[in-house]
Amino acid sequence: MESLPIPDPELTIAVDLAIRAAGVATGIVNRSIDERQSATVETLSKSNSVDLVTQYDKQCEEEVIAILKSGTSYAILSEETNSQVELTDAPTWVVDPIDGTTSFVHGYFDCCVSIALVVNKEPILGVISAPRLNEVFTAIKGRGGFL
């Protein structure tokens, strides 16, 4: 088993937090899809007309960040927040609250919630939750991936 740059007890906490955060965001995505079967989604453009953000991105991001902060003091880089956090060697969460926002906005529900933990500028943990597939994928560097 590969040695990782954070101790196993800390890694266990990180895995649990990421899975819990992804689950909460998945619930938000699923409820929003169910609620808006015939409604439209309010969108804003970020950097260009195809780089979209919705109220659901922001809501998911807020919930994910709150959960991650509740159990760690790691920095957080999130796609929807214009944060000044730079990736360093310190443990850092990297979050995309709704990965595939453009598909989500247009009614194609092949989006996911993506959360990673990066240490020494290398990902060591990833959690991907696919709301409409009702599946959660986790991977830990050197230890495998799990469904």
Image (cartoon, rainbow, N blue to C red):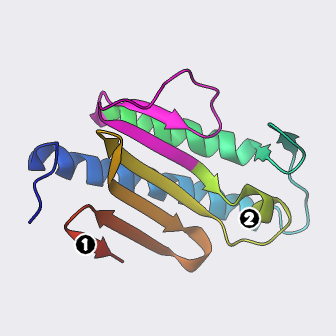
The structure residue drawn at horizontal position 15% and vertical position 50%, both measured from the top left corner, is: 4
The structure residue drawn at horizontal position 91% and vertical position 57%, both measured from the top left corner, is: 40
The structure residue drawn at horizontal position 50% and vertical position 35%, both measured from the top left corner, is: 77
Q: Is residue 35 visible?
A: no
Q: Is residue 11 left or right of residue 1?
A: right
What residue would you read off at disc 2?
33
The crowd level at tag 1 (other Cα within 10 Å; few <14, some 14-19, many 20+) is few
Q: Is residue 2 shown above or below 93?
A: below
Residue extending farthest top = 84
Instruction: Examine the image and state in which quarter residue 126 appears.
Output: bottom left
Asked whether 136 or 91 is in front, the reply is 91
Q: Is residue 19 left or right of residue 5?
A: right
Element class at badge 2: helix
In percent of width and height, residue 24 lies at 49, 53
Label total for image: 2
Q: Is residue 146 shown above or below 14?
A: below
What span is in magenta? Answer: 71-96
**Is disc 1 in contact with disc 2, using a CB cutoff of under 8 Å?**
no
What residue would you read off at disc 1?
144
Element class at badge 1: strand
Q: Is residue 89 visible?
A: yes
In percent of width and height, residue 116 lies at 41, 50
**Amino acid type, residue under disc 2 in the picture:** Ile
In percent of width and height, residue 90 lies at 29, 30
The question of residue 90 being in magenta is answered with: yes
Q: Is residue 99 shown above or below 14?
A: below
The question of residue 32 being in magenta is answered with: no
Gap between marks 1 and 2, in whole Å?
32 Å
Asked whether 50 or 134 is in front, the reply is 50
Instruction: Examine the image and state in which quarter residue 10 appears.
Output: top left
Q: Is residue 145 left or right of residue 104?
A: left
